[in-house]
Amino acid sequence: MFTFRHDSFLLVGMTAALGLCLASPVRAEEHEEHGEHGEGEKAAKPPASYAEGVKRIDHHLHEIAELIEGNKLADVHREAAVVRDTAKALPGLAAKKDSGVAQKALPEITKAAKALADTFSKIDEVADAGKMEETKKVHAQMNELFATLQKHAKEGTGHKMEEHHKD
């Protein structure tokens, strides 16, 4: 015979299962929305160091600038995704003792890296919509945030901002 306690666990389990079932179609719709430029994407190997991460972001921001200049806004997603994923890794890399990053810079790096990663959804949205001017504005914001991250990297981590990121 079932007890009140057993019935409660059964009810909780059924509610959780129902929640998962209802959540799945939403996730599928989100993935379908970006299916054309999200398919075949492989997660990039995480950078081994803070300096390597900064170089990678520099490269992909340059690629985004070229896509904007070539009016290939639909292709911005892939490059911006690498920037997002790499930016998310930077605070942990900066915190390593051998990173060459001053420990007092960690709060600033963490804040800038999170803000840079958070620009992904906005640039993806406006680029997908073909909104050139808005895409340029978000790209400029990304470059400003990147400048904060770049100043804390060891020398040799990339080119000067004005060389590649003119908007």
Image (cartoon, rainbow, N blue to C red):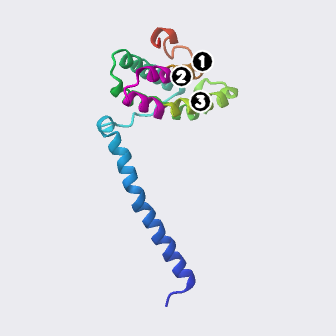
**Residue 94 circle label:** 3
Q: Residue at x 45, y 71 (%)?
A: 14
The picture quadrant where one finds residue 101 is top right
Would you call the spot at circle 2 few (<14 residues within 10 Å), some (14-19), or many (20 or more)? some
Q: How far apart are marks 1 and 3 (CA)?
A: 12 Å
Would you call the spot at circle 1 few (<14 residues within 10 Å), some (14-19), or many (20 or more)? few
Q: Residue 119's x, y, as percent? A: 50, 31
In the current view of this chain or complex, which residue is farthest to the top?
163
Foreground pick, 76 / 97: 76
Relative vertical location of residue 133 with respect to residue 159 in this rendering, above or below: below
Relative vertical location of residue 39 with respect to residue 16 in this rendering, above or below: above
Foreground pick, 141 / 39: 141
Considering the whole magenta stretch, tell me its main secondary structure. Answer: helix
**Secondary element at image label 2:** helix
* Residue marked by disc 1: 151
- N-terminal of the pair, mark 1 or mark 3, is 3
**Secondary element at image label 3:** helix
- N-terminal of the pair, mark 1 or mark 2, is 2
Residue 124 covered by magenta stretch = yes
**Secondary element at image label 1:** loop
Eye-nearest disc, 1 or 3: 1
Looking at the rendered structure, the kind of residue marked 2 is: Gln
Residues in magenta?
120-139
Q: How far apart are marks 3 and 2 (CA)?
A: 22 Å
Foreground pick, 36 / 43: 36
* Residue marked by disc 2: 141
Residue 118 covered by magenta stretch = no
Q: Residue at x 39, y 50 (%)?
A: 27
